[in-house]
């Protein structure tokens, strides 16, 4: 008999803060981590599916991630994230393939096929690797949602000051 429990789902503010702290920890330790994002507004809590899909996705992810990995809202109601800590870069490609296969299988086991097909899964490595190993750094990386918010708040203040 399989015992399923729904993992605690961190709110967006907590998850983004944890991601920022994990970047700092990785910079100090030299260890890598992976951020997995599951995007799909409708499938992840849109009006059509509601919280029951989010609950099933949370149970599915809880069955394949480690207790030390953090699951939460990357963008509240729009995309979920999982922070996989201390990832071995030497085995990165096989790790990502294995994680992707396990997550997809767990989702297929708990969701309707059409819902699974609406979920886009992406992986983001930190520290970002060079192009030579198949990973590319980007200026607007998913690894920096806190910076994006900070830039948005600064731009808003500048716009408000210019309007005064």
Image (spheres, rainbow, N blue to C red):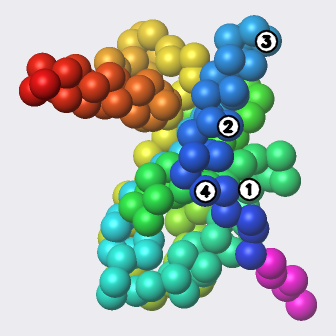
The percent position of residue 62, horizontal first and vertical second, equals 73, 66
Q: Is residue 61 left or right of residue 69?
A: left
Query: Which one is earlier in the sequence, the residue at label 1 or at label 2?
Result: 2
Quadrant where the image shows the C terminus = top left
Q: Foreground residue, 134 or 55?
A: 55
User: What residue is disc 1 on?
Assistant: 65
User: What residue is disc 2 on?
Assistant: 18
Give residue 49's quadrant in the image.
bottom left
Q: Is residue 90 left or right of residue 5?
A: left
- Which mark is on residue 29? 3
Label 4 environment density (alpha carbons within 10 Å; few <14, some 14–19, many ≥20): some
For the record, the magenta segment spans 1-5
List the single residue furthest toward the left.
Answer: 163
The percent position of residue 99, horizontal first and vertical second, equals 62, 51
Q: Residue at x 12, y 20 (%)?
A: 162
Disc 1 vs disc 3: which is toward the camera? 3
The percent position of residue 45, horizontal first and vertical second, equals 43, 75
Query: Which one is earlier in the sequence, the residue at label 2 or at label 4?
Result: 4
User: What residue is disc 4 on?
Assistant: 11
The percent position of residue 93, horizontal first and vertical second, equals 56, 33
């Amino acid at each position: 008999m399989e015992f399923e429990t729904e993992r605690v789902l961190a709110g967006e503010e907590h998850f983004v803060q944890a991601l920022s702290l994990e970047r700092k920890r990785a910079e100090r330790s030299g260890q890598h981590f992976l951020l997995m994002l599951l995007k799909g507004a409708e499938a992840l809590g849109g009006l059509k599916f509601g919280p029951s899909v989010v609950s099933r996705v949370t149970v599915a992810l809880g069955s394949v991630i480690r207790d030390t990995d953090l699951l939460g809202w990357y963008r509240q109601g729009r995309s979920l994230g999982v922070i996989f800590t201390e990832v071995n870069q030497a085995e990165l490609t096989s790790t990502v393939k294995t994680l992707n296969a396990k997550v997809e299988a767990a989702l297929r086991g708990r969701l309707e096929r059409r819902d699974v097909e609406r979920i886009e899964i992406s992986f983001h490595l930190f520290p970002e690797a060079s192009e030579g190993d198949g990973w590319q750094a980007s200026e607007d990386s998913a690894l920096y949602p806190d910076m994006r918010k900070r830039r948005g708040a600064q731009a808003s203040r500048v716009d408000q000051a210019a309007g005064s």
